[in-house]
């Protein structure tokens, strides 16, 4: 039963891609009703990005979103499987907690890397909005704390870093969903 619940929570982020993103994908697809004269590249934006660059950025951003949702799900599961203070480190829950913690740290790194890859042009040109900058700052801070947390186990710093990192990354995701 526990494994089915865990599997369900890990698969759930795949279905959290919003309808707006699916609509944007259709608009950016190669079958979109845009045409360019033969031998020229279609310029879809004023910053010199061609259609292929825009599609790559869109796909990287989709993977970034899915990785972010998965990171939050793994972080939640990691917290829920944390052994009680009076339990020994040899318990099955402690082993599961440790495994999920390492997976969460790895997904945090992947999420941050995909976020940079998807938005590196905006970062380099200094074209990030305040909202995007807040999302990036909270996401990087939270991700770094989640990556550092396993190195402090078992201590109070481990628990604080894990929980604060999860909260910061959760606020970053929530910010993007709301604004």
Image (spheres, rainbow, N blue to C red):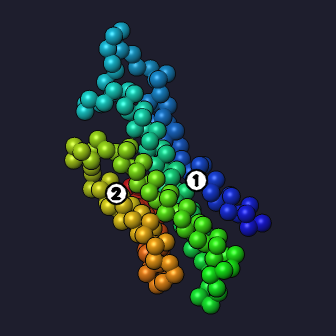
| Residue at left offset 48%, top offset 44% | 62
Q: Is residue 30 left or right of residue 76?
A: left
User: Residue 31, how many percent across, how many down?
Assistant: 49, 21
User: Residue 93, how many percent across, how many down?
Assistant: 67, 76
| Residue at left offset 73%, top offset 67% | 2
State which tag comes first along the sequence, 2 or 1. Answer: 1
Instruction: Please give the label number shown on residue 134.
Output: none
User: Residue 164, how many percent across, how many down?
Assistant: 43, 74
* Residue 130 position by quadrant: bottom left
In the rendered image of this protein, does residue 40 appear above or below residue 143?
above
Q: Nearer the viewer, residue 157 or 132?
A: 157
Instruction: Please give the residue where the numbered disc 1 appears in the rendered image.
Output: 13
Q: Is residue 129 left or right of residue 7?
A: left
**Element under disc 2:** helix
Task: Say few, some or many: other residues with alpha carbon within 10 Å of mark 1 (under 14 / 14 to 19 / 20 or more).
Answer: some
Instruction: Please give the label number shown on residue 136.
Output: 2
Looking at the image, the residue that sits furthest to the right is 1
| Residue at left offset 37%, top offset 31% | 53
For the C terminus, the quadrant is bottom left
In the rendered image of this protein, does residue 44 appear above or below residue 143?
above
Looking at the image, the residue that sits furthest to the top is 38
């Amino acid at each position: 039963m526990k494994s089915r619940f865990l599997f369900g929570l890990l698969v759930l982020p795949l279905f959290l891609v919003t309808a707006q993103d699916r609509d944007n994908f259709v608009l950016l697809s190669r079958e979109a009703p845009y045409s360019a004269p033969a031998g020229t590249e279609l310029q879809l934006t004023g910053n010199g990005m061609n259609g292929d660059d825009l599609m790559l950025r869109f796909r990287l951003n989709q993977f970034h979103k899915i990785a972010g949702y998965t990171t939050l799900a793994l972080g939640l599961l990691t917290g829920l499987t944390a052994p009680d203070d009076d339990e020994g480190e040899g318990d099955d829950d402690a082993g599961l907690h440790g495994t999920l913690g390492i997976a969460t740290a790895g997904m945090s790194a992947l999420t941050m890397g995909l976020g940079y890859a998807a938005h590196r042009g905006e970062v380099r040109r200094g074209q990030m909005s305040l909202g995007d900058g807040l999302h990036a700052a909270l996401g990087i801070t939270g991700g770094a704390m989640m990556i550092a947390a396993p190195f402090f186990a078992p201590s109070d710093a481990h628990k604080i870093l894990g929980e604060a990192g999860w909260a910061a990354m959760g606020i970053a995701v929530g910010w993007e969903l709301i604004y």
